[in-house]
Amino acid sequence: MNYDYDVIVVGGRVAGSATALLLARLGYRVLIIDRSHPSKDTFSTHAIMRSGVLQLQRWGLLQRILDHDTPPIRRIVLGFGQQEISFDFREAFGVEALYAPRRHILDVELLAAAIEAGAEFRQGYRLLDLIFAENGRVTGIQANANGTQTELRARFVVGADGMRSRVAAAVNAPAYETHPAVSTYAYGYFAGISSGSYDAYFVPGVAAGFIPTNDGLTAVFTARPNNGSLIDDDEFYRLAAAASPNMMAQLKTAERMSPFYRTLGLPGFLRVPGGPGWALVGDAGFTKDPISAHGISD
Ligand SMILES: Cc1cc2nc3c(=O)[nH]c(=O)nc-3n(C[C@H](O)[C@H](O)[C@H](O)COP(=O)(O)OP(=O)(O)OC[C@H]3O[C@@H](n4cnc5c(N)ncnc54)[C@H](O)[C@@H]3O)c2cc1C
């Protein structure tokens, strides 16, 4: 069979671009398709954990993230009711801080690096279905390419298309360890918060915290158990006050610079991650509650 590519990666954000980058650096002919573009912000905060920063460093991309004046986070503060502990980030393997770049910076830099490594990117391509050989192996994709239906062949198709993965649905990838959405979240961006650390505060039934990011802004989040209703503006501040009076004191003098973004929560699950001619990466294979702040790093 004539293949157009060695690998087609569906989804061009953190998981897809990182996978494409590594494959292209190994010399494979890689195509990334995305129905959208990673320069559009996505619904997510963006605290990267040590493993994620380490990967950026190893791939030679950390400096590109720092070039956007992404602030270093060298201290972590954890509050549990009256008790608060803080600790400094320990330098290891050349990584001296954590970072929380906005997704329109992180995802765009990852995609740019994948393209520089030789991957091709096609925007406005929405996966419709996979193409299967008679023996059941995946051999390509059917996509809506900016309004035109098209078929492309590849030895391998990688689903990096998020938790509602079309690739996973097409191959019927079984999910396991499934859990309902238990926590409801809201977050927004504020100016004038000087914390400079990852702060996470917990009291029974409430979590809240600070994630310092680009442009002098801090992503502030609150969370509580999912009772079927979203966190409205008033409740956002009530939850912050309940989680930590210190946090609320800082919020009072801060200026909100964005709307609040809200979700009832995310289910958690793993999916069987691969089969003949296909694989799943990122949220497509492993979606978890955002409180873990590990989706990007994983
Ligand atoms: C409220 C909230 C807060 C979070 N906070 C954090 C945090 O602080 N730290 C952290 O590490 N993680 C966090 N996460 C999780 C994180 O956002 C995800 O783990 C991460 O975005 C997964 O990246 P991905 O590349 O796998 O998928 P996605 O970011 O979902 O990207 C999937 C891509 O696939 C494309 N796509 C989808 N379907 C198709 C199709 N049919 N055809 C073509 N393209 C398609 C989409 O356009 C998209 O670009 C949070 C999530 C939420 C909801």
Image (tube, rainbow, N blue to C red):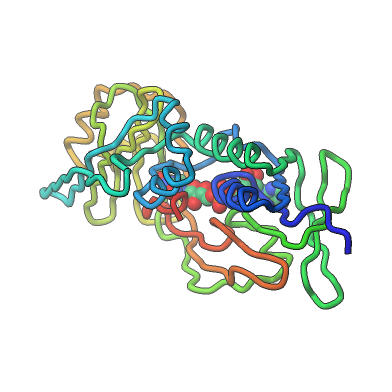
**Taking 280 as reference, is 102 above or below it?**
above
Q: Is residue 214 left or right of residue 105?
A: left
Residue 190: which quarter of the image? top left
Residue at (56, 48) in percent of width and height = 18
Q: What is the residue that sits farthest to the left in this orientation?
A: 82
For image coordinates 44% across by 47% down, the residue present is: 58
Q: Is residue 136 left or right of residue 227?
A: right
Point out residue 182 in the picture as x, y percentages from the top left corner. 41, 60
Query: Residue 67's spot in the image, x, y percent?
Result: 44, 26
Q: Residue at point 34% right, 49% down?
A: 50
Q: Residue furthest bottom?
A: 135
Quadrant of the image for the N terminus? bottom right
Q: What residue is at 51 percent from the left and 32 percent from the top?
A: 105
Question: In front here: 28 or 65?
Answer: 28
Q: Position of residue 25 (x, y in %)?
A: 61, 48
Given the current orientation, which residue lies at the most extreme front position? 27
> Residue 128 sits in which quadrant?
bottom right
Judging depth in this view, the residue of 232 and 244 nearest the camera is 244
Residue 42 visible, this angle = yes
Q: Position of residue 179 (x, y in %)?
A: 47, 68
Can residue 185 be seen from the camera position used here? no
